[in-house]
Structures are given as structure tokens and as C-alpha cells.
Image (tube, rainbow, N blue to C red):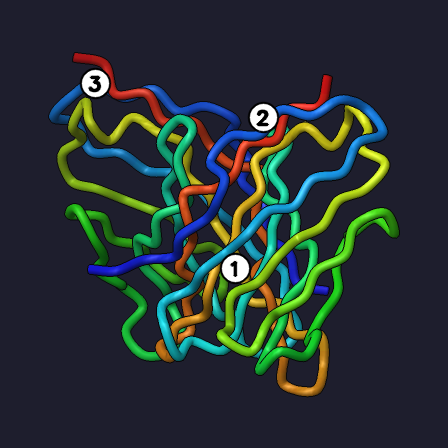
Amino acid sequence: AAGVIQSPRHLIKEKRETATLKCYPIPRHDTVYWYQQGPGQDPQFLISFYEKMQSDKGSIPDRFSAQQFSDYHSELNMSSLELGDSALYFCAERRSTGELFFGEGSRLTVL
Amino acid sequence: AQSVAQPEDQVNVAEGNPLTVKCTYSVSGNPYLFWYVQYPNRGLQFLLKYITGDNLVKGSYGFEAEFNKSQTSFHLKKPSALVSDSALYFCAVRDYSGAGSYQLTFGKGTKLSVIP
């Protein structure tokens, strides 16, 4: 079955650089979530969108921004990268049955 | 805010033995609880959920979970563990932020190791 597609799967950046992660949910799924999972940590909620509008905001740094586009794909933009931003970033869509369906994640390494 | 706690960082079990991964919750109102599994460098895979109804919930890969309201617990169980069940398991609770939107708040995770 089709799933949430995230790109890139791996990304290496230097400190103070900018990174953009992309998420492509299953077509016509209108709710997208972004989570950050640091090494050995549980996933932390960053931000979510419903019908292209921000619906909730979690522990997302001011250096990060996100949006959902007309085709429902979403992008997470991260600027002034810090070493502590190195993590797995997951995108998830909300199914009609209530659970979140996660992508395979994008691993960001900041050097 | 809603929260879940996983009291064990690691659980070791012999292959073929029953396994239990513990989760307790703290919520206001009715709890909506989930279990996810994560293999190394992979995404979170949904196993099962409790919304309402039977206290024993059956999910994927032979896993089940028992909702216990009096003990505020939602332990994950499997009658006979497989080596391939070795992974990181997360309990999660639906956390409403108002205006009908919600997200999942996860526990710290429990590493399950099934020993051949």
C-alpha cells in the first residue's frame, strides 16, 4: 500500500546552514504532522497542518518553519542549523481511523 | 496535557516466552491510547490502539494490549515472542490542543530484546 514519502532520506549540513525536508502524504489526506526524534529519544511533536493551515504547534524552534501546499505535500524549513538539530525528522498523516501513519523519516546530520 | 509513562527502558525475554511491555497513562477525560514499534533507522509503525470498547485490543503481528482503567495502564503483550520482535516500542496518547486538533504524545520508549 502507498505510504507517506519523505525526502531526502539522509542529509548532511554544516552549522548555520539551511535545510529543507519534504513530505508527501497519501493523496487526499489533509492532515500532516512533523516530529523530531533525537538520538535515543522519543519523538517530539513539532507542528501540524490541516487543509493547508497550521492546526497545532509543539516544541518547534523559531528557526524552523513549515507549510502545507495546495497538493497537500508539506515542507519543513530549518535555518541557522545547530549541532543539536541532528535528528530523525518524521512526517505523519492522520488516518480517518485516528492513528498517525508515519513516513520512514529524514535523518539530518549537522556537522 | 496528557502523558504516558513507560517504566522500563529495556525488556529482555527468551524466544517463545510471553512478553509484556508496560505503559501507564495520565489523562483528563477518556484516553485514546496507541502502541507503535520502531526498528533501527526506520519510521514508527502502528501496532494497535484503544479508543473505546473491549479492554483487550488485538493488533498487528500477534500483539495485543490490555486497557485497565483502574490501574491506568495499557500494557502491550504477546503470547510467544519472536527474535524479529526485537525493536523499540513506544506507547502514545492522543493529546488535544483545542479546536478539534490533536497530536500524539509519546512515552520514552522501551527497547525489547528477544533472546534466541
Between B94 and B77, which is closer to the camera in this rendering?
B94
Viewer-proximal residue, A49 or B91? A49
Residue that badge 3 annotates: B14
Residue depicted at 38% across the width and 79% down the height: A96
Please tell me in which quadrant of the rendered image residue A88 appears: top right
Mark 3, chain letter?
B
* Amino acid type of the residue that numbered disc 2 sits on in the rendered structure: Gly
Q: Secondary structure at mark 2?
A: loop
Say which residue label 1 marks. B72
Distance from disc 2 to disc 3, alpha carbons, whole Å, reads 24 Å
| Same subunit, tags 2 and 3 | no
> For the point 46% across and 48% down, which residue is it?
A6
Q: CA distance from mark 1 to mark 3?
A: 28 Å
Callouts 1 and 3 in the same chain: yes
Which of the two marks, 2 or 3, is nearer to us in this view?
A: 2
- Is circle 2 on the same chain as circle 1? no
Q: Amino acid at mark 1?
A: Thr
Numbered disc in front, either 2 or 1: 2
Q: Quadrant of the C terminus of chain B?
A: top left
Among the 4 quarters of the image, the one containing residue A52: bottom right
* Residue carrying label 2: A40
Kind of element beneath mark 1: loop
For disc 1, the neighbor class at 10 Å (few under 14, some 14 to 19, many from 20) is some
Residue A7 spot, x, y in % from top left: 48, 44
- Estimate the x, y position of residue B111 in percent, counting from the top left: 43, 27
Question: Which chain does the numbered disc 1 sit on?
Answer: B
Indicate whether B8 appears above or below B73.
above
Q: Residue at x 19, y 22 (%)?
A: B83
Residue for point 53% across, 40% down? B6
